[in-house]
Image: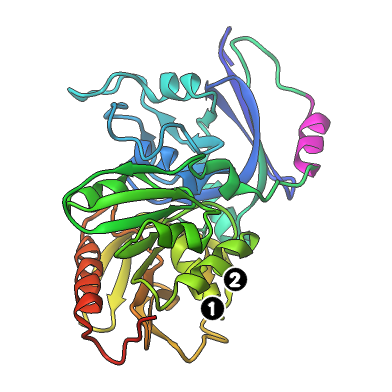
Amino acid sequence: MKHGERRAYLLLEDGTAFEGKGFGAAAVSVGEVVFTTGMTGYQETLTDPSYYRQIVTFTYPLIGNYGLAPGVEQSWQVRAFGVVVREAAPTPSHRRSVETLDEYLRRHGVPGIEGIDTRSLVRHIRREGTMKGALVSTGPGEGLPDKAALRAHLEQPIPRDHVAQVTARAPYRIPGQGKRVVLVDYGLKHGMLESLRHRNCDIYVVPAWTPASEIFALRPQGVVLSNGPGDPRDIPEAAETVRELLGRVPLFGICLGHQVFALACGGRTEKMSFGHRGCNHPVKDLTTGRVMITSQNHGYVVSREGLPEDLEVTHVNQNDGTVEGLRHRHLPAFSVQFHPEARPGPDDAAELFDRFLEEIDNAEAGVGEGRVYA
Ligand SMILES: NC(=O)CC[C@H](N)C(=O)O
């Protein structure tokens, strides 16, 4: 260690430890250690509320090389709790860049560690599954805290109120001339707002716990259930509300919204070993036979086992065969596990927003197979 250099340490729940160089905020952070294979889009990733209480490892070795710029973020804060990279680029180059990854994380109070063997960490997570970790990044010249103190941090259970921490505090509207859509905010990404705004929707964003009666009072033509952090089973009220919406207004669920939709229909979800996080997950649309390259970020998945009769699997992950999309057989409601709004990642699935608007038109025209309206 050079004089004045910042030290950092990542300690996993199973005792595996990595020592490296600190960057970002001088702080200690505890979260689920996950990895993403996205080679770009680090700013979108770190500000995606679905990463709340997670320490994100980037498998791509150089992160921060095109800097950080306003307008790219997916929420107003860095939502990840920590950042693990092989190398944080010290001198980014891009005409829109205003700061380095180090400065950005410092401003947002989030610690980072660099200079560790991220490949070995990721292989460990792939073998053992994601697990809790404590990341400490010290100030210049400071010594590392005692390992026992870090272990004590790790013994604290991670709270499970993720959605409550990131959902909107109050409803708001983004006016548009087109369809009136209520977006239920479990931890939405700005990209979702942009995708709807781009299609002229009149958007009403409501907090996660908004009762169905209040949603209906907004007279929506369609309801979108957003992405969000944590385990979908930790928010049973959400599935309860969706059950009330089902069949009375067209629904489109994305990621956590997809999982909540499945639970509302009587399906089950389970935790995956290390999840899907990255920008290149191949997903087959079983209706068209087409494979899309999708943006993903999830640790839970809808189980095939116990899938209710009413739900049809529409999309399948081509890497591991997991469920990536569902449609209700009788009601205007469908959902996907991946991110049609991308950010980061490819726009292959963007047309799903158009499909949702078509679904609204069909519902209003009373067409579609056996669709029932209350
Ligand atoms: N991006 C998301 O909405 C993630 C959903 C959920 N928190 C999961 O990890 O599976």
For numbered disc 1, what is the local secondary structure?
A: loop
Q: Mark yes or no: residue 314 visible.
A: yes
Three-letter amino acid code at the position of disc 2:
Glu
* Residue 222 placement, left or right of 273: left
Q: State the quadrant of the C terminus.
A: bottom left
* Residue 260 placement, left or right of 296: right
Front-most of 11 and 103?
Answer: 103
Q: Is residue 215 above or below residue 330?
A: above
Q: Residues within 10 Å of mark 2 (few under 14, many from 20)?
A: some
Q: Mark yes or no: residue 344 visible.
A: no
Q: Is residue 154 magenta?
A: yes
Residue 152: name its quadrant.
top right
Residue 65: name its quadrant.
top left
Residue 60: name its quadrant.
top left
Check disc 1 and report the residue beneath it.
Answer: 303
Mark before the other along the chain sequence, 2 or 1: 2
Q: Is residue 320 magenta?
A: no
* Residue 153 placement, left or right of 66: right
Position in image of residue 77 (x %, y %) = 45, 32
For numbered disc 2, what is the local secondary structure?
A: strand
Position in image of residue 200 (x %, y %) = 17, 51
* Residue 314 placement, left or right of 302: left
Q: Is residue 355 above or below residue 34?
A: below
Q: Residue at x 41, y 32 (%)?
A: 76
Position in image of residue 247 (x %, y %) = 40, 78
Q: Residue at x 53, y 29 (%)?
A: 112
Q: Residue at x 24, y 44 (%)?
A: 175
Residue 270 disc label: 2
Per the rendered image, the range of residues in magenta is 146-155
Q: Residue at x 51, y 87 (%)?
A: 308
- Alpha-carbon span between mark 2 and mark 1: 6 Å
